[in-house]
């Protein structure tokens, strides 16, 4: 355990930020799972709305530095491809 006041504060801040990052990553994963469930059902309209929500969460996470911007772009691209395949199948 740190003895210096500034080091103690840094440890506390790190814990807070780690918890927030976990929360953001978890919400992204949940949004992606909801989107993929809608795609599996073949519900194009619902999937389109869920893609918008998931993209918004991914963009916010990338802006805050929780995930890398290239990681965000890759996730969004893969989701868009799945949506387009669903649209082509209908």
Image: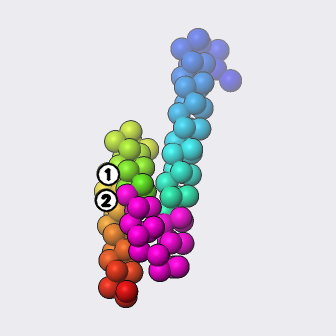
Res. 24 in view? yes
Disc 2 + disc 1, Cβ < 8 Å: yes
Q: Secondary structure at mark 1?
A: helix
Residue at horizontal 39%, vertical 81%?
86
Q: Nearer the viewer, residue 36 or 89?
A: 89
Tell which residue pokes out farthest to the bottom in this image: 89
Residue at 43% across, 57% down: 54
Is residue 8 shown left or right of residue 64?
A: right
Residue visible at 38% across and 50% down in the picture:
56
In the displayed structure image, the side of residue 6 where residue 79 appears, left or right: left
Which one is in front, 9 or 38? 38
Residue at 53% x, 64% y: name it.
34
Q: Quadrant of the C terminus?
A: bottom left
Q: Residue furthest right?
A: 1
| 43 up-or-down from 59: above or below | below
* Residue 33 image point, x, y percent: 54, 65
Position in image of residue 89 (x %, y %)? 37, 88
Quadrant occupied by the N terminus: top right
Relative height, residue 59 to residue 46 (above, below): above
Q: Measuring from the top left, give residue 37's x and y in whole percent.
A: 54, 72
Residue at label 1? 69
Looking at the rendered structure, the secondary structure element under dot 2 is helix
Camera-nearest residue between 9 and 63: 63
Instruction: Please provide percent x and percent y for residue 46.
Output: 45, 67
Q: Is residue 22 above or below residue 46?
A: above
Question: Label 1: how many residues lie within 10 Å, few (<14), some (14-19) or many (20+)?
Answer: some
In the picture, the disc for residue 30 is none
Residue position for label 2:
73
Segment colored magenta: 33-52
| Residue 44 relative to residue 5: left or right | left
């Amino acid at each position: 355990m740190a003895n210096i006041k500034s080091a103690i504060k840094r440890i506390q801040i790190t814990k807070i930020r780690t918890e927030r990052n976990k929360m953001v990553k978890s919400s992204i994963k949940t949004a992606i799972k909801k989107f993929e469930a809608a795609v599996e059902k073949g519900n194009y309209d619902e999937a389109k709305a869920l893609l918008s929500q998931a993209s918004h969460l991914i963009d916010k996470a990338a802006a805050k530095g929780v995930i890398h911007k290239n990681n965000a772009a890759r996730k969004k691209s893969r989701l868009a491809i799945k949506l387009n395949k669903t649209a082509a199948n209908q």
